[in-house]
Image (spheres, rainbow, N blue to C red):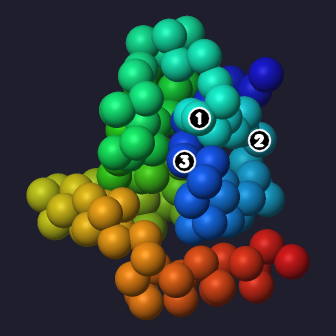
Amino acid sequence: MSQITVIFDGQCDFCQQSVTWIQHKLPITALPYQSSDLSLFNLTPEQCAKQVYVISDGITYGGADAIAFLLDQRGNKIQSGLIRASGAIGRASYRWIAHHRKSWPVRLATKVLTFLNR
């Protein structure tokens, strides 16, 4: 297993495409929460249904913090910095995306990621 573990929604197309995009430049172990032993990470299915989690060096990041961490590790320092600097706005934006996965902006983003992952 890699040093970075990502627990994500394996039934979400946007989540799947995002993980694939991250994996192009960053070795991670990606685990769908629906089929993983979450107790190994002290997480519950209810927690994982709400947001992505990243575990690295014994630290657990969730939601926008997890995304910022992954982007930073992937080499996308500016995007990571913007998420971190935006604070509550970044966290609210993450929650909006997580709760509106069927919306046209998220579906469009999924199509863009699908294209980039080819």
Q: 115 or 34, which is in the foreground? A: 34
Considering only vertical position in the picture, is 110 above or below 25?
below
Q: Tell me the quarter of the picture where residue 14 sits.
A: bottom right
Q: Answer whether residue 27 is visible to the viewer in this image.
A: yes
Query: Which residue type does callout 2 highlight?
Result: Pro
Q: Where 69 falls versus 111 (above or below)?
A: above
Q: Which mark is residue 34?
A: 1
Q: Residue at x 43, y 29 (%)?
A: 45
Q: Furthest-left residue in view?
A: 88
The tag on residue 75 is none
Query: Which badge, 1 or 3, is on the more N-terminal residue?
Result: 3
Dot 2 surroundings within 10 Å: few (below 14), some, or many (20 or more)? some
Task: Indicate the position of residue 15 as horizontal and vertical percent values.
Answer: 57, 59
The residue that mark 3 highlights is 9
Disc 1, SS: helix
The residue shown at (13%, 58%) is 88
- The nearer-to-camera label among 2 and 1 is 1
Q: Is label 3 in contact with label 2 (beta carbons under 8 Å)?
A: no
Q: Is residue 75 visible?
A: no
Q: Nearer the viewer, residue 80 or 34?
A: 34
Place residue 16 in its image quadrant.
Answer: bottom right
- Label 1 amino acid? Gln
As drawn, the residue found furthest toward the right would be 118
Q: Where is mark 2, residue-wise?
A: 27
C-alpha distance separating marks 1 and 3:
7 Å
Residue at x 40%, y 22% (from the top left corner): 44
